[in-house]
Image (cartoon, rainbow, N blue to C red):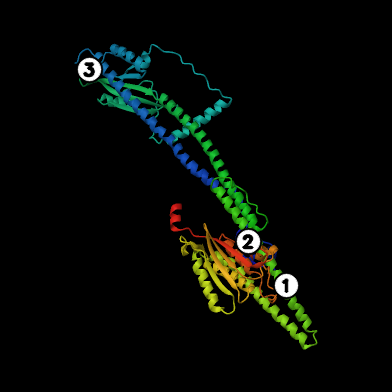
Amino acid sequence: MTVLKPYMVSDTGIVKAEQLSNSDTKKDIIVRRPKRRVSPLTFRILAVNLIALGFLAGGILYIDQYQNAMVQSRINALIKDAEVMAGALGEAATITAERTELLLKPSEQIMVRIVSVTNNRSRLFGLDGNLWIDSQDLANNQSVIIRELPIKDGVSPFLNHISTAIMRLLDSFNKRQDIEVYHEVKDEKAEHYPEVMNALEGNIGYRIRLLSDRSEIITVATPVQRFRRVLGALMLSTDTRDIREAVQKTRMTFLKFFGVVLAVTLLLSFFLARTIVRPILLLARSADQISAGTHTSIDIPDYSSRNDEVGDLSRSLKDMTFTLARQIDAVASFAADVSHELKNPLTSLRSAVETLSFTKTDVAREKLLKIIGEDVLRLDRLISDISNASRLDAEMSRSQMVEINLVTMMETLIDLYGTSHKDKIPTLHLDIHKDRKKTDRDYCIKGMEGQLGQLFRNLIDNAISFSKKEGHIWIRLRRIKDMIQVTIEDEGPGIPKDRLEDIFDRFYTERPKNEAFGQHSGLGLSICKKIVEAHGGGIIAENIYNKAHTKVKGAAFIVQLHAMPHKAEQSSKS
């Protein structure tokens, strides 16, 4: 019959035990981790790296400010050129200061000379608003520019198309006011250009217009004056194709650099995620398999060679799994030993009960009843000792390590035995090895007081059971470097040479011949060994011989525990 827990974990989450079908009660439900296409930890690593890269990508938008600055610089330069040319026209293209018209021939010569240097289109408007001179009509050094037609097939047109689309997309991020589209007028007049009308009123103005190829054209109009008298308006114009090409080239260089950085970031992020996420996932799956019982062996991936937190996690999981497996084996072994030990008195008790009904004499009946009573007492004692042994691990896991003075503990134990069993037990002697440098502080340890008291009581009770009432038991304390050695010696028959280690096994008993059978369960020394090992110490048993080493005078149990360092030692280590 399978006993269900109130709640169990399934693939879909937590379900109540009463909701499970009968088939579910016959097997354990294995906790399965959901299969994810993308690890959340990998996604977080990518997100963190890409967020930082996003700030770099946002820098491409600041190129627009660079473009605006270059355009403004071009406007300022064009205004200066216009002022210089207008000043030259006002001074050189008039006869006298009283004349209000410009001479066309000198004006043409001045414009040709200056335009050949600046390469800016220049247009001169009169006070009547008519176009007088256009530098395009005066150009002498005209050349034919040959442009190759774009190739329609192959990879290059495709790449050019992508590049153009990217540039248009980036241009859309440049939030500028709607720009007027430039149109070439056949018969131009001043009224077609607001900046020219403004210049005829004596003010300098400029306009930015949009060409068909998405580039811009800048027009600057300035009044042509002589002694503050407006004689006409000069308009200079130039396009910004070179600025746009420079900005586009900068953008493409930045995009290429960004693409390389993005690819490297993604590769490094996936590499980092793989070196972190994959080991953790393997460790988690192995832990799930072990906890589900599908693997009986310790099957934890070994990353202990890694000098990082993943290696620490791997080592901790392996140590934890090893400890858990050892505890499970110990529980299984303990259960088997308990079962075996309980069968002996139960078998004897069953035989006595079955035989009792066939007895015909009172003597035989009394003998069987005595056996039944002894077996019952043996069972009671055995169950009590098993309960104490089982409770020991839980008590040690909850107990706190405190400072304990072994001299004080031994003196208290001797007083306790002397008060309660003075005439029934051998004489207890305490021998503390002290020299001029040794004090009671040298016999202090860090441990669990209750468990250590049980340890030494068990050893003293064991020595009493093997000693005569008029004998002696010695408890000797020695400080050997950083270890404290406690030796409990008795005057009993000793221990068989081949059993010096077996006596610490569970349920093993080696009792005196005159002692009644079943008085001891064989758990006392096993409990002592477990307590000593929990404190990081050791315990051994040996025989005491005479000087000639020919006769056994008794047995000795030697316990070694780590002593607490003095304050001076602690400060020097720190």
**Residue 491 visible in rendering:** yes
Query: Which of 90 and 337 lies nearest the eye of the viewer?
Result: 337
The residue located at (60%, 72%) in the rendering is 461
Label 3 crowd (10 A; few <14 / some 14-19 / many >=20): some
**Residue 32 visible in rendering:** no
Residue 107, located in which quarter of the rendered image?
top left
**Residue 54 horizontal/vertical position (percent):** 46, 40
Secondary structure under badge 2?
Answer: helix
Q: Amino acid at mark 2?
A: Gln
Query: Which of 56 and 227 lies nearest the eye of the viewer?
Result: 56
Whether tag 3 and tag 2 are in contact, CB under 8 A, the answer is no
Q: Amino acid at mark 3?
A: Thr
Q: Amino acid at mark 1?
A: Lys
> What residue does disc 1 label?
343
> What residue does disc 2 label?
327
**Residue 480 horizontal/vertical position (percent):** 53, 58
- Image vertical order of residue 114 relative to residue 50, above or below: above
The residue located at (47%, 34%) in the rendering is 169
Label 2 crowd (10 A; few <14 / some 14-19 / many >=20): few
Question: Which mark is on residue 314?
Answer: none
Lower position in the chain sequence, tag 3 or tag 2: 3
Secondary structure under badge 1?
Answer: helix
> What residue does disc 3 label?
100
Q: Left or right of 213: which side holds 196?
A: left
